[in-house]
Amino acid sequence: MNENRIYKKRIRLSEIHSILSILRQNGLHTVCEEARCPNISECMGKKRATFMIMGDGCTRGCRFCSVKHYSPSEVDEDEAFKVRDAIISLGIRYAVITSVTRDDLPYGGARYFEKVVNTLKEAIPDLRIELLIPDFRGDKEAFEIIAKTRVDVLGHNIEMVRRLYPSIRPEADYERSLDLLRYFSRRGIFTKSGIMVGLGEEVDELRKTFLDLKEAGVRMLTIGQYLKPTFNNVDVVKYYTDEEFDYIRRVAMECGIEFVYSGRFVRSSYSAEEQYKGVL
């Protein structure tokens, strides 16, 4: 059995051409492309995408991620308006905005998130907005900038169990991510996180992570299979079966997390609009 083949989806260029042309015209990036998401055809075929702001160069180099790691360029000051124009052109009613990690910018670039959200809310008052943010190195001033935007959903991915951080995410910090999630949940903002499996974690470690996320106030969790995006990334240790994903979902719900989406192709922004509607 070829596990890699089972865990891949065919990319149909005809389904994504129209949205890609709009993105290219506006000089915009998506995490769908940069992270080599397996769901790109399905989502873009529905005229959906997760906009990635502040460029395509990340100041960190996590071993699971295919986003480019290099010294980033200056941020396009018109980016917020370009995101607005693309969302209007595509008729998007639920926007997901993320970014590369920009440790080189003041407040980690939180002001650019603020500008995008304010621009979108002014232009499309009934637009729902979900942010998927980096950890801003734990900067509470950056957190406050984001909190004041009144986003509908605040996402920050824990990504993996605590034990794997030093070897796979050495520039991130497990407790720092929990502190971030706790900060926003205590502000009354609907808080969401995501985790990958297949990196060598044990079920007991997952259960502890779910309990930590529950304590931090996380209400929604996505659980998906880690797929090695390039030869340079860390290897897959285990491919989970559908039955195992269902079991992990039940474990997370038993730990008190209200809304759990678990499956081989589940990603933090995958079907985000449907996930949100399921909460209402």
Image (cartoon, rainbow, N blue to C red):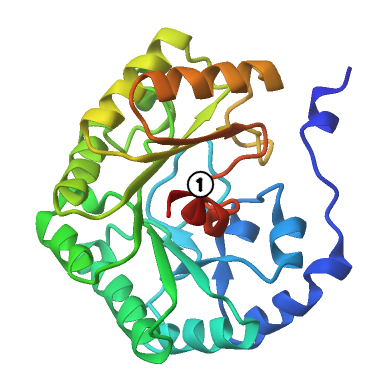
User: For the point 63% across and 79% down, which residue is it?
Assistant: 23
In the image, 139 versus 271, the foreground residue is 271
Residue 103, position in %: x, y? Answer: 28, 57
Q: Secondary structure at mark 1?
A: loop
User: For the point 53% across and 53% down, which residue is it?
Assistant: 269
Q: Classify residue 229 as left or right of residue 11.
A: left
User: For the point 57% across and 55% down, which residue is it?
Assistant: 274
Q: Is residue 32 above or below residue 264?
A: below
Query: Dot 1 surroundings within 10 Å: few (below 14), some, or many (20 or more)?
Result: many
In the image, 80 versus 128, the foreground residue is 128
Q: Is residue 72 visible?
A: no
- Which residue is label 1 attached to? 268
In the image, 132 versus 104, the foreground residue is 132
Residue 73, position in %: x, y? Answer: 41, 73
Q: Classify residue 101 as left or right of residue 95.
A: left
Q: Is residue 123 visible?
A: yes
